[in-house]
Structures are given as C-alpha cells and as structure tokens.
C-alpha cells in the first residue's frame, strides 16, 4: 500500500470520530478500563498524552495518576519534530502550546525533563489502529520517533474509539506497533504481523 492509503484511512477515521455524539462518555469508559487493567505501580513512569480535538480524553488518567502520587510524564512538541518529555506534578503546569495542545509551561521544562528510557508505560494517541497494534497518527511522526527510543520492555498502550479500528493499517519498516489497544467495548492484546 502507498501513503495515499494511509491518508485515506486517516481522513475516514477522523470523520468517524467527529460523528460520535457521546465521545465524553466513551472516553470515561476507556479510561476506566485502562486504569482497571493496568494498575499504576509505585515508582513507575507513565507517559500520558494530553488529549486534543476529538481524541479519547485523557484528563481522568492524568488526574488519577497525580492523585495517587505516581509519576506522570506528558509530551510536548519540539522544533525538530520530536517530543520533549515533562514530569508533571500539577495540572497548573500546563498551558496552550503548538497545535492548541496543552503543554508544559516553557520556563519549567528544563528542570523537569525526563529521558525516554525512563518510561515504563506510554499511553499513545492515534487516528486509526488495527488489531496488530499498527497505528496512524496525524502524519507528523512525533510519536513514531519517540517509540523508537523507548526501552524494549516499555509497555505501549493505544487508546481509541471502536470506530477508529480498521481491518489493516499499512505499516512501514520504521513504524512501531502498540502492545495493547483499549476501546470502549474491548481490550485487545496486539500481536504484530510477521
């Protein structure tokens, strides 16, 4: 498949997601399932994306991790199309940044930076997924680059609405699948195609 196929899937998935009338309720179900199935271990570092637009809302996960005194890391966009990683200790440390996404306040970033190899679990956004864990993002490659820099034992969990699951997502050699996928109706242990 060529890149046009990925673009077609991306457009279709975004349109499906925009048509959901109860995305907030569905997000709550997804977040509850994640928290129940993957209890946060003490001293573990979780990266949780900060939701934007019609994505699965991650506010509940961020609040849960912070309320229990665990380590939560949030990503932010750097100028070289890579993600910076910030140790969040208070939701007030976020402000609107690139693409309208809540990001860490710029003056706090240097002192609360986390290296990718410190992450134990990463909650990954996506526009579309398949049951093998392959994903399509918005096309800028921010998360793809991060996924290549993680420890091999870092658990990668994708969050999506059922309407974002496709029979097959074309995967390039540099693409890294997620290990687990959670939707409002199912929890999928992904097995990458060989």
Image (cartoon, rainbow, N blue to C red):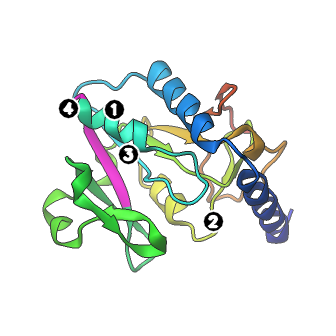
Q: Helix, strand, or loop for circle 4?
A: loop
The earlier-in-sequence mark between 1 and 4 is 1
Q: Is residue 73 above or below residue 52?
A: above
Are the residues flagged by discs 3 and 1 in contact, CB closer than 8 Å? no
Q: Position of residue 178 (x, y in %)?
A: 58, 41
- Queried whether the magenta region covers residue 86, the answer comes back as no
Q: CA distance from mark 4 to mark 3?
A: 14 Å
Q: Nearer the viewer, residue 168 or 183?
A: 183
Q: Residue at x 49, y 20 (%)?
A: 37
Q: Residue at x 34, y 64 (%)?
A: 103
Residue 10 falls in which quadrant of the image? bottom right
Q: Check disc 4 and report the residue beneath it.
A: 69
Return the residue at label 1. Answer: 64
- Quadrant location of the C terminus? top right
Please report whichever mark, 3 or 1, sits nearer to the chain's N-terminal start.
3
**Residue 138: image tag:** 2
In terms of secondary structure, where does tag 2 sit? loop
Q: Earlier in the sequence, mark 4 or mark 3?
A: 3
Instruction: Using a 10 Å C-alpha cutoff, classify the residue at mark 1 as few (fewer than 14 neighbours), some (14 to 19) or many (20 or more).
Output: some
Which range is magenta? 68-75
Does residue 72 show up magenta in the picture? yes
Q: Earlier in the sequence, mark 4 or mark 2?
A: 4
Which numbered tag is attached to residue 47? Answer: 3
Disc nearer the start of the sequence (2/3) = 3
């Amino acid at each position: 498949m060529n890149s046009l196929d990925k673009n077609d899937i991306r457009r279709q998935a975004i349109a499906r997601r925009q048509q959901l009338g109860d995305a907030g309720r569905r997000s709550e179900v997804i977040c509850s399932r994640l928290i129940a199935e993957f209890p946060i271990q003490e001293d573990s570092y979780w990266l949780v994306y900060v939701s934007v637009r019609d994505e699965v809302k991650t506010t509940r996960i961020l609040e849960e991790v912070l309320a229990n005194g665990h380590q939560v890391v949030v990503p932010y966009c750097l100028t070289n199309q890579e993600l910076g990683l910030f140790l969040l200790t208070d939701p007030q440390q976020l402000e609107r940044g690139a693409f309208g996404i809540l990001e860490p306040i710029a003056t706090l970033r240097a002192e609360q930076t986390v290296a990718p190899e410190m992450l134990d679990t990463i909650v990954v956004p996506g526009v579309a997924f398949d049951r093998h864990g392959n994903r399509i993002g918005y096309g800028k490659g921010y998360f793809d680059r991060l996924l290549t820099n993680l420890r091999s034992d870092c658990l990668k969990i994708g969050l999506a609405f059922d309407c974002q699951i496709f029979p097959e997502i074309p995967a390039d050699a540099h693409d890294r699948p997620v290990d687990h996928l959670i939707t409002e109706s199912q929890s999928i242990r992904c097995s990458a195609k060989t």
